[in-house]
Image (tube, grey):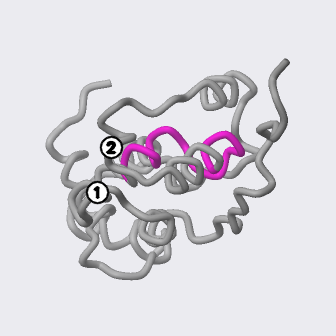
Amino acid sequence: MVLTDRIKEIIAILMDPESGALRDPATLYGELEDMGYTHEEINRALDMLDFDSSPEDHTSDSLNRARNRILGELEKSLLSIPAQGYLLSMLRMGYISETQLSVILDNASLEYSPPLSLFEIKEIASRYIPDLPEYDPSHSTRRSGPLH
């Protein structure tokens, strides 16, 4: 999918960290229309950012890809171990999309010095996904005993 400059502009407006709190999508949609963007351009930008997704919207195919996601070396160096676990858990449970994970990581690299704490990564994630559940690493699916 080729990104036009206009769609990139919309994404930049949507992801602007200076805007503060998450704005109402209907109001934001109207503002973008008033700025001269078409319905198609706005919808493509919103689809790319996957703002309106919920865990029920994900197909089993997309969930399988998310369950198999690992962080690259650069991503790992950016985050503390608890922050890594948090993001991967939110992705595996379907609370964030792959695109949202990328946006969160991009903002993390611009706003904080590595390694980011769990608190810092939660703060960034909450800007884009306001209803994220609490994360309790003690309820991990990892076994506490030996593997054999």
- Measuring from the top left, give residue 129's x and y in whole percent: 54, 64
Tell me the CA gap for discs 1 and 2.
7 Å
Question: Secondary structure under badge 2?
Answer: helix
User: Quick one: which residue is furthest to the left in this view?
Assistant: 5
Picture layout, residue 141 above or below residue 52: above
Q: Is residue 38 one of those drawn in magenta?
A: no
Of 4 and 103, the residue lying toward us:
103
Left or right of residue 125: residue 59: right
- Measuring from the top left, give residue 131's x and y in whole percent: 65, 69
Of 130 and 104, the residue lying toward us:
104
Kind of residue at disc 2:
Ser
- For marks 1 and 2, the one nearer the N-term is 2
Are the residues flagged by discs 1 and 2 in contact, CB closer than 8 Å? yes
Kind of residue at disc 1:
Pro
Q: Quadrant of the N terminus?
A: top left
- Measuring from the top left, give residue 102's x and y in whole percent: 39, 43
Instruction: Give, as a single range, the part of the protein colored magenta.
Output: 90-103
Residue that mark 1 sits on: 114
Residue 77 shows which numbered tag? Answer: 2
Residue that appears at 33% across and 62% down: 14
Residue that appears at 29% across and 78% down: 19
